[in-house]
Image (cartoon, rainbow, N blue to C red):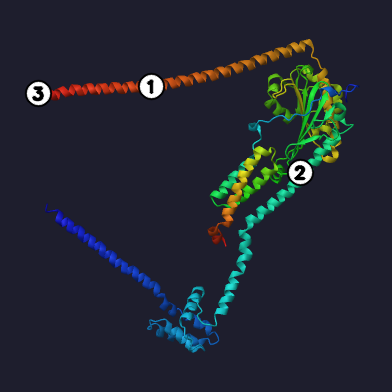
Amino acid sequence: MASPKPSLLFITLLLLLLHLTITTSSPHFEGFEELELEPEPDFDISLPPPPITLSTSLDPEPENPPLDHQPDLNPKPETPNPQLEYWDEEEFEGFPEPEKPKTELGQNGLDSDPVQNNEPELVETVKVKLSQPVPLTKRIKSYIIEIFCLLFLVLFSVKYFVGKKTNESLALAWATKFATRGTIFDKNFSLLGVGDKEGEDAPLLLKEGQNVFKFYASGRRYCQGLVATMELKSRHDLIASMYNVFVPCKDEIRIEVYMNNDAMDHVVFALGKKRAAKVMDKEMRDLQRFGNVLASSKKWVADELVVVSELKEVAADLLNESVVEQVFGEKAFEKLGKYFISMHFSDQQQSTHRKMLVFKFALPVTNHMADMTPLVALVPYYIDLIGRYKLSSQARSKTEAARIKVAQEVQKELQNARQAALQRKKAERRKMMDEAEAQLTAEILRKREEKERARQLKKAMPKIKMSRGG
Amino acid sequence: MSSSGNDPRQPSTAKPYKPQPIHPDNLPIDYSGFLAIICGVAGVMFKYKLGSWLALIFCAQSLANMRNIETDLKQISTGFMFAVMGLVTNYLSPARAGVKT
């Protein structure tokens, strides 16, 4: 019990030391405050420059007097005295408030050295000079984002209205060329336009967005109707049109003809420019399943075109001499090539309507809409051709076999998918069961362990009893 | 090029146009609206005024490309809200303005 005392003493000593250090340090802080207060004499020391500026007229002489002043100022701890002296030197000798000049001094001292009354004007001019160039250069720079963005928004809105109008005029030019009275679609369809009633007032085009226009026609033999969708360049969108500078695109029209179910035999046929045909061959399931790329050995269609067909015979019948001569031949295609993209006839289309003819053309400029007339004329021509077309018995059996095979495959795939789904479900259920069992077994194990422990305890207990008993 | 002489038109079979109902999931994705929301959120979160301005621009683009008013307007309005919120916090908050000017 003797040892704690010195330790307590030691701790108290330590505490005292700490206290002393804190107390000694606090005066230090006070001293800092004093140091902060000290600058006033420093100011007085730094006063010499102003006299220099003041006495620019008398160069060599005034340099000495400030030096003389310095020793005078240093011994004097009080600041107001020299100021008063300065004030006394000037006309404001008996000025009752010495504090006012003090504040002026402080302000001036912050900005620049001068203390004298003559200086403020100079200070003001300096201030003006400093404040003038800031707004001119820096403000414009700081608002550059706002300026740029607002300019962009204005340009965007201008482009929107201009582009919207050009797109509308292009679509209208197409409609007036091919869908007004006495034109191709009027001669072939009894109902034109998307209105419910037949008449002049019914609108021909349906506008879906600013660059998508739809045209509908119905009332013709062999087909239920036709929907032409014009997807024009997004001229209304500044960002998209900027993008299209690097990735050019065309004004496209896609004409879908919904054939009557009884009016189309087993036909899977596609014709397109090389790139478009490749994409179609990859993406279209019916072309993948039934179609084969036909190599054109003899002079048949233009070199740019690729024919994909289920049967060679069908392709030959669809691309008969007159069509090749007028549209797809080497000579005719030179002119029409830039407006043709692809066409795809199939009774196995991947869409809501199975039997469908799809034409894809590029639209010419508004003034040259007549250039694509032969291509648009293909639409009613192929409706009639395919509507009447009957496969030979041999070809029919072939295509039928192919379709049955494909149907079986599809069914198999479906069944497989269904079975896989079922198996997955079963596996999941089994997993769940296993997990539940595992939990159960774990519980059982725990119970068993507890029992064993209890038993061991019981075994141990009697020993104690025995010992007690002993 | 028409192969038949007689009139192919059949007014009796004409059906009025029925717009195909488009499932909302099959609609083309509105990238600009999405970008507007992302930029707007970034502008609000990081007090980044360029983000808010970009959000406003993408809002305008999304508005220009709008097809289906009901579904698209929601996204555009959220993007627009974020953009405006970002601009308001950027330009009207006193502390920020004090630093800038």
Q: Amino acid at mark 2?
A: Lys
* Badge 1 vs badge 3, beta-carbon distance below 8 Å: no
Q: Please tell me which residue is depicted at 57% across the width and 18% down the height of the picture.
A: A418
Q: Position of residue A310 (x, y in %)?
A: 74, 18
> Alpha-carbon distance for marks 1 and 3?
45 Å
Q: Can you say whether A81 is above or below A258 in the image?
A: below
Residue designated by label 2:
A164
> Alpha-carbon distance for marks 1 and 2?
68 Å
Q: Please tell me which residue is depicted at 72% across the width and 13% down the height of the picture.
A: A400
Residue designated by label 1:
A438
Q: Amino acid at mark 1?
A: Ala
Residue designated by label 3:
A469
Q: Earlier in the sequence, mark 1 or mark 3?
A: 1
Viewer-side label of 2, 3: 3
Within the image, what quadrant is residue A408 found in? top right
Q: Can you say whether A259 is above or below A2 in the image?
A: above
